[in-house]
Amino acid sequence: MAKAQGRIGNDLTEGSIAKKLVIYALPLLLTNFVQQLYNTVDMAIIGHYVGSVGTVGVSTGGDVATFLTFVGTAFGQAGQVYIAQLAGARQLKKISFTIGTLLTLMFLVSSAFAIISIVFCEQFLQWLNCPEEAFQQAKNYMIITSLGMPFVFEYNAIAGCLRGMGESKRPLLFVSIAAVSNIIMDVLFVAVIPLEAAGTAIATVAAQVASCVASLVFMYKRKEHFDFDFKLKSFRIYKEQLLILLKLGIPMAARTALIQLTQMYCGAQINSYGLTVSATNSVGKKISKLVNIFNGSIDGGAGAMIGQCLGAEKYERAKKTVYVAMAFCSFFCLLEICLALFAPTAIFRVFTPDEKVLELGKLYMRITIIKFVLQVFQGPYQAMVTGSGFASLGFVVGILDGVVLRLAFSLGIAELLRRSGRGDMSFLGFFYGDALAHLGAVIPSMIYFYSGKWRTFKLLKTKKPQLVEKGTEGADKADAGKEA
């Protein structure tokens, strides 16, 4: 249908599930890999040329930006879920309304976040217990990366729109442009011109600008495929689309915000144990993100496919998608476990030459195996929650995973280690807590999947969209007439 109408994207409601999932998820996998690659280059270069002080500075200075950026990611995912269901139901005109609403909303929110993070930079770093040796590095990194926040939000919004329509190849091109820009400028501003963490930040922002501009140019040149003309009047906030995006995005963003706050709290506690433990955690988080792109890409593809299938009311296909995704995740899990058991030092050495960090990294990777196993079940089951648009359940799942169990396991195990006379190793409680917390996502998502409630959960409406602004009722009726 999409090809017949000359539109961007793919129909994920027909054909072999495994083949469609691979075709959709492979570009998503490469996109996430390239995205993590240039983030990894940041950490590797700063670690080798500046040392643990630079590593902690970039990691801690990026925590607040990461926290706020995940809000943009959440709304990008909200746009993906809604557009996937609209594409499955063939409600093409509403896709245009959703694009205009999402792009406008993200620009306003990201601009506000950028100002807040710059103004309150030092206070945020103090709350994170940033080590004194790395404070200036973290401050420089945070201020500069905050300037790129609007570009990150807009890119995530555009990528969400494309993926909801079944298009996963173009975001790979945009991120590849960003990666090349980032790597070249990382070498220039850190290795050649010793700007330290500030140089890494400049390279990161330049990469974000490049990916955002490339995605906007792509959409503009193919605007007829999106029914979006890029005229100023099209950047409006439509009431129906806004309410659905908020219904989806606010729980996702709130969940992400609470999870990130919890992780920042845990990171602050870990930082209090000194530079070696802090650097181990910083490198470990980077490795976990890099390794998780395999499962995350399969899960993202499954969520988009499920969304289209539910929009088209193909419930059995949506159910089978979960099982196919789980099979792929199991394969990746075996590879991840092998890396954690047999090559932990080699992996950590990519980021740091510090022997103390390398030694502690072995233990970190063994603990992370727990996370790898749980993610085999977490992602596929949670893809059904996401694909169906059940945002309130997604919020509960995220809070159990990222907040309740994370704090309970982290603080509980740390306290047990202290009482057993191993207080100097109590930081391990936070490593174990990060891994075991995923039980909070696995159990409720599994219950929801096997209950079959997702078959009756409704997100799409037949009511015509209305503009938020006054005096636009006539425009709404005109648009509705055109759609009819």
Image (tube, rainbow, N blue to C red):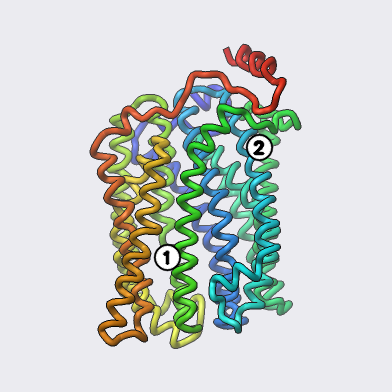
Choose between 420 and 455: the one closer to the eye. Answer: 420
What is the CA distance from the residue labelled 2 to the residue labelled 1? Answer: 33 Å
User: Which of the two discs, 2 and 1, labels the residue nearer the N terminus?
Assistant: 2
Residues at badges 2 and 1 in contact (C-beta under 8 Å)? no
Judged from the image, the secondary structure of the residue bearing numbered disc 1 is helix
Q: Check disc 1: other Cα within 10 Å, few if <14, some if 14-19, many if 20+.
A: some
43 versus 229 height, above or below: below
Judged from the image, the secondary structure of the residue bearing numbered disc 2 is helix
Residue 374 coordinates in the image, percent (x, y)? 29, 58
Amino acid type of the residue that numbered disc 1 sits on in the rendered structure: Ser
Residue 115 coordinates in the image, percent (x, y)? 70, 56
Amino acid type of the residue that numbered disc 2 sits on in the rendered structure: Met
Q: Check disc 2: other Cα within 10 Å, few if <14, some if 14-19, many if 20+.
A: some
Task: Determine which residue is flagged by label 1.
Answer: 288
Which residue shows up at 66% across the image and 37% down it?
Answer: 219
Task: Determine which residue is flagged by label 2.
Answer: 219
